[in-house]
Image: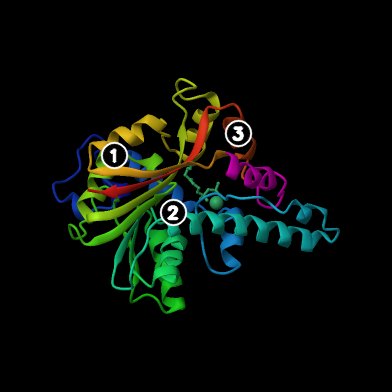
Amino acid sequence: MNHQQDDKESPLTIAPADARNLPTQSMYQNRVADYWNAEENPVNLELGKLDDLYHHHYGIGAADRSVLDEPDPVLRRERITAELHRLEHAQAELLAARLGPLSPADRVFDAGCGRGGGSVVANLRYGCHADGVTISAKQAAFANEQARKRGIDGKVRYHHRNMLDTGFETGAYAASWNNESTMYVELELLFAEHARLLRRGGRYVVVTGCYNDTYGRASREVSLINAHYICDIHPRSEYFRAMARNRLVPVHVQDLTADTIPYWELRREAEHLVTGIEDTFLSAYKNGSFQYLMIVADRV
Ligand code: GPP
Ligand code: MG
């Protein structure tokens, strides 16, 4: 299936009826896939290389800023890289801790799995089966290769599919999550798919950047973040509205905004890793227009 060609030849056609086997369903999704197929930011690859846990999310917790004082320039870079990775890993563990308790027989769904770090973290913690879904064929191939190298490819599998229409078995999952991937999709469609996949009593966790309803509409900084990643950040309110409509009942809500600021304060000093979006995130968090949020919900 050649999506590029489809898109050039008939830009106005609707998705074919057999959309389930197609990882993308719209021109927008093709552009998002293009971004992730091309993405090779050192801030993701250099951090991931340290222990072969490739994360595509930000970090939380107090940063050890003494790494900035390291006099040896090579060691300084290495120490900054390792510290940022430690903070990103702490975020992944915070999310994973909320999925359980889970047994090795349980199955979890990682929606928007990127290069696969989150599913590995879940498997290491619970021994569970994991299915990760990404719209990027390149990310899925990379993540599967990582699972193969770890010898967990029998339990952890990555799929080049659309998280809104996975084709996975109804009610087969004990837990599922989105780690900074909801801003690419319509929440109603996303939560309907999670509710379908989760068994009754299953657990859903989302960590996301959302815009703050009390600020008003999306701020300039939120719009800049949208343009940077080709995404569409939702307001906080929309999460709760869409969950309520899709049998997902929040059991825990945590504002992680203050916890993520040290990560960004350190990342902006990492000359070898910056992508240019660092100051925008800091302004967005500090002016109150943007929040870093975790919502944990039960599927009823
Ligand atoms: C980080 O991925 C997350 C996103 C791109 C989604 C947008 C998230 C928001 C909270 C708005 P990444 O790790 O690939 O990004 P970067 O390359 O900047 O580290
Ligand atoms: Mg990153």
In the image: residue 212, left or right of residue 86:
left
Q: Is mark 3 within 8 Å of ligand 1?
A: no
The residue at the point 60 percent across, 60 percent down is: 47
Which residue is nearer to you in this view: 25 or 48?
A: 48
Q: Specify the label residue 280 is tagged with.
A: 3
Q: Residues within 10 Å of mark 2 (few under 14, many from 20)?
A: some
* The stretch drawn in magenta includes residue 259: yes
Asked which secondary structure carries label 3, the reply is helix
Residue at horizontal 36 percent and vertical 63 percent from the top: 101
Q: In which quarter of the image is residue 237?
A: top left
User: Which residue is under mark 1?
Assistant: 243
Say above or below: 239 vs 3: above
Please, which colouring scheme is shown? Answer: rainbow
Is 23 colored magenta in this rendering? no
Numbered circle sitting on residue 37: 2
- Find the distance from the CA under tag 1 to the CA under tag 2: 30 Å
Instruction: Give the extent of the magenta segment.
Output: 258-274
Q: In this view, does 248 lie to the left or right of 39?
A: left
Identify the secondary structure beneath mark 1.
helix
Image point (45%, 51%), residue name: 36
Say whether disc 2 or disc 3 marks the residue closer to the N-terminus: 2
Query: Residue 282 is drawn in which quadrant?
Result: top right
Q: Mark 1 to mark 3: distance in Å?
A: 29 Å
Amino acid type at circle 3 is: Thr
Question: Which of labels 1 and 3 is toward the front?
Answer: 1
> What amino acid type should be assigned to the residue bearing mark 2?
Asn
Residue 191, image x, y percentages: 27, 44
* Most distant residue in the top direction: 216
